[in-house]
């Protein structure tokens, strides 16, 4: 792989066969998103760590549209985070 710093020294036509494609070209090559997928189904397809991060940071208005199972998981993750924060503050004081 070429040194990224050297890319700035090249004329733009030199990138025609370069692995760094323009963003529009990459997006055009990606399949269309299925608009019929509801938020719960989408979140369930995420890897566990990402799903937990999304659920713990999700706005309450979005939690309200999730399935009961995911809403309960989101509430549990938030409760765990609040408890860790509370313990952290106790250590500081």
Image: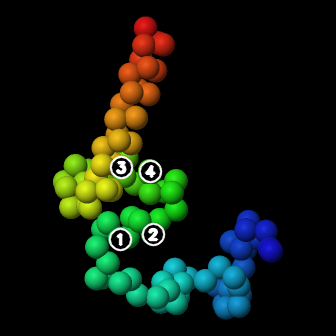
Sooner in the amino-acid sequence: mark 4 or mark 3: 4
Where in the figure is residue 48, as x and y percent of width and height?
A: 51, 57
Which mark is first along the chain, 3 or 2?
2
Disc 3 secondary structure class = helix
Q: Which mark is residue 53?
A: 4
In this rendering, would 86 be left or right of 38? right
Q: Which mark is residue 41?
A: 1
Secondary structure under tag 2 reads helix
Q: Position of residue 24 (x, y in %)?
A: 48, 84
Q: Tag 1: Cα neighbours inside 10 Å, few (<14), some, or many (≥20)?
A: few
List x then y, in percent, for residue 8. 68, 72
What label sits on residue 45 in the rendered view? 2
Which residue: 38% across, 83% down?
A: 33
What's the CA distance linking mark 2 and mark 4? Answer: 13 Å
Q: In the rendered structure, are the residues bearing label 1 and label 2 in contact, judged by CB atoms less than 8 Å apart?
A: yes
User: Residue drawn 38% across and 22% down?
Assistant: 86
| Badge number at residue 17 | none
């Amino acid at each position: 792989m070429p040194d990224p710093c050297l890319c700035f020294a090249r004329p733009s036509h030199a990138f025609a066969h370069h692995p760094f494609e323009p963003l529009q070209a990459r997006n055009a090559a990606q399949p269309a998103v299925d608009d019929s997928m509801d938020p719960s189904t989408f979140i369930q397809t995420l890897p566990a760590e990402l799903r937990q991060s999304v659920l713990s940071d999700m706005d309450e208005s979005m939690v309200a549209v999730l399935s009961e199972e995911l809403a309960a998981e989101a509430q549990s993750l938030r409760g765990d985070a609040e408890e860790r924060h509370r313990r952290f503050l106790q250590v500081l004081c």
